């Protein structure tokens, strides 16, 4: 399945890593099944985001990233998706982002409204950490660039061609800021994510 996908699209967001840190042999297998130009985005372990809630978890982050770097040039961003009930804590965010490995391409998806303000955006800009622009039924992230690259998670199921074009315009509007952008559509239920992603690539 992965080789078939990788022949048609150039990146994927891995949810597996949210539940467990992959074994080095798994990472090696992913590399064997994809071209060198393919990029894996890895969701940070729930042990970090949901259990520890960004506190006292540096060893876990370091080990996870050590394993992830086995992907070599195939390693894309690491997405820290925070739980919906974790409210804004600017000091916590600052401490956590400062402790991340310097080479990590980190993105944050905030799922509580309290995080979505200029103080948080400024903290992310300070470390070139990307605000994940998420379009969901429950919350829409402001279209704010906080890094020199972009990350969009488009999670609705009813996107039409006009919606894809509209989000493509969002990406185009940031071309002077973003040297790269990662866009992912929801695919778990209806299975139309790859089709939408292909449409997006065609219009960008």
Image (cartoon, rainbow, N blue to C red):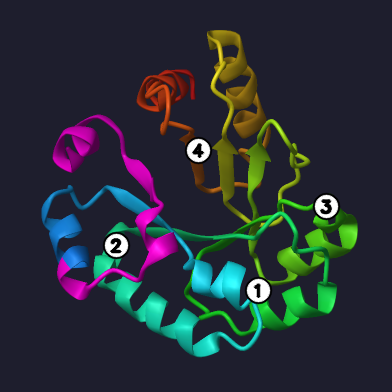
- Classify 10 Å Cα crowding around label 4: few (below 14), some (14-19), many (20 and above): many
Residue at (83, 65) in percent of width and height: 88
Alpha carbon distance from label 3 to label 4: 20 Å
Question: Could you tell me which secondary element the residue under label 4 belongs to?
Answer: strand
Judge left or right: residue 69 versus residue 49. Answer: left
Residue designated by label 1: 53
Point out the frontmost of discs 4 and 1: 1
Residues at badges 4 and 2 in contact (C-beta under 8 Å)? no
Magenta span has 24?
A: yes
Q: What x and y, as percent, mark residue 164?
A: 55, 19
Question: Could you tell me which secondary element the residue under label 2 belongs to?
Answer: helix
- Which of the pair 15/167 is nearer the observer? 15
Of label 2 and label 1, which has the lower sequence position?
1
Judge left or right: residue 132 versus residue 10. Answer: right
- The relative height of residue 21 versus residue 6 in the rendered view (above or below) is below
Q: What x and y, as percent, mark residue 132?
A: 63, 49
Residue at (36, 56) in percent of width and height: 16
Which disc, if any, is residue 89?
none
- Which of the pair 59/170 is nearer the observer? 59
Q: What x and y, as percent, mark residue 94?
A: 75, 77
Residue designated by label 4: 183
Of label 4 and label 2, which has the lower sequence position?
2
Question: Could you tell me which secondary element the residue under label 1 belongs to?
Answer: loop
Residue designated by label 3: 116
- The relative height of residue 137 versus residue 52 in the rendered view (above or below) is above
The image quadrant that residue 163 belongs to is top right
- The relative height of residue 49 versus residue 133 in the rendered view (above or below) is below
Alpha carbon distance from label 2 to label 1: 29 Å
């Amino acid at each position: 399945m992965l080789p078939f996908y990788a022949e048609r699209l150039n990146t994927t967001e891995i949810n597996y890593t949210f539940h467990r840190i992959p074994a080095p042999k798994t990472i090696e297998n992913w590399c064997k099944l994809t071209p060198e130009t393919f990029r894996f985005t890895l969701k940070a372990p729930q042990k970090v985001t949901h259990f520890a809630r960004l506190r006292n978890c540096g060893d876990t982050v370091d080990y996870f990233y050590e394993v992830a770097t086995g992907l070599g040039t195939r390693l894309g961003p690491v997405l820290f998706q925070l739980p919906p009930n974790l409210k804004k804590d600017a000091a916590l965010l600052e401490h956590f982002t400062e402790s991340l490995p310097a080479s990590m391409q980190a993105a944050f998806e905030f799922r509580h409204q309290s995080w979505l303000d200029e103080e948080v955006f400024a903290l992310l800009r300070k470390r070139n950490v990307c605000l994940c622009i998420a379009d969901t039924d429950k919350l829409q992230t402001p279209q704010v660039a906080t890094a020199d690259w972009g990350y969009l998670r488009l999670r609705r199921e009813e996107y039409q061609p006009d919606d894809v074009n509209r989000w493509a315009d969002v990406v185009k509007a940031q071309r002077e800021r973003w040297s790269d952008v990662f866009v992912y559509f929801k695919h778990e239920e209806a299975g139309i994510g790859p089709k939408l992603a292909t449409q997006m690539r065609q219009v960008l």
